[in-house]
Structure formats: structure tokens, C-alpha cells
Image: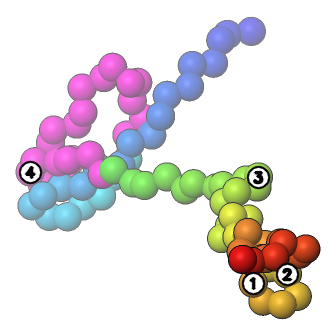
Amino acid sequence: MPEVTRVPTYEYECGDCQHRFERRQSFDAEPVAMCPECGGKARRVIHSIPVIFKGSGFYITDSRQSRNPGGERASETKEEGKKEP
């Protein structure tokens, strides 16, 4: 069985006629420089990738301090039994 070589698909856009086209190329291949429709200068279109945050610590509710029933933060509560001079 022959080995399957996977190569990425790149999207290009012509600067003159705005024609968009795709090419499957290896990572070390030179980018396409010419539009197949009009012969104008083509450039590679870069897309942003989606980012998915999984796990704890990514939501605002994960980093909030807990509040006691009196409305004060747990770190701000007065210690009971302590007398002030």
C-alpha cells in the first residue's frame, strides 16, 4: 500500500482581479506568484484559527473570591472574639 503524503491547502487572492483560488502545496514549496485568471500578482490569504479554552480558570466566575452572606468578601471579614483597644 503506498504511503499517503498530506499537504496543506493554501488560499490565494489576486491583487488585480480579486480572484480567489486554492493550491495544495508542501510546506517548503514556493508560494504561487501569478493569478491563473489574469496573470496578476497573487498573494497568500492568511486566516485566523479558532481557539477553544477548556478546563477551569478561563471564565470570570472561576477567579472571583467567594462572598459570605453579609456581602463582604471572605478576606475582608472581621475576626470574631478579637477586641479592639
According to the picture, the residue beneath numbered tag 1 turns out to be 72
According to the picture, the residue beneath numbered tag 2 turns out to be 68
Residue 45 left/right relative to 41 = right
Mark 3 or 2, nearer chain start? 3
Q: Which mark is residue 55?
A: 3
Check whether the beta carbons of the residues at disc 2 and disc 1 lie within 8 A of each other.
yes
Mark 2 or 4, nearer chain start? 4
Identify the residue shown where x is 64% and y is 55%.
Answer: 52
Residue 30 sits in quarter: top left
User: Is 66 placed above or below 26 here?
Assistant: below
Mark 3 or 1, nearer chain start? 3
According to the picture, the residue beneath numbered tag 4 turns out to be 40
- Residue 59 in view here: yes
Q: Amino acid at mark 1?
A: Glu
Distance from the alpha carbon under mark 2 to that under mark 4? 67 Å
- Residue 61 in view here: no
Q: Position of residue 26 (x, y in %)?
A: 40, 24
Check whether the beta carbons of the residues at disc 2 and disc 4 lie within 8 A of each other.
no
Distance from the alpha carbon under mark 4 to that under mark 1? 67 Å
Residue furthest front in the image: 85
Residue 69 left/right relative to 1 = right
Residue 47 sits in quarter: bottom left
The magenta stretch spans which residues? 23-45
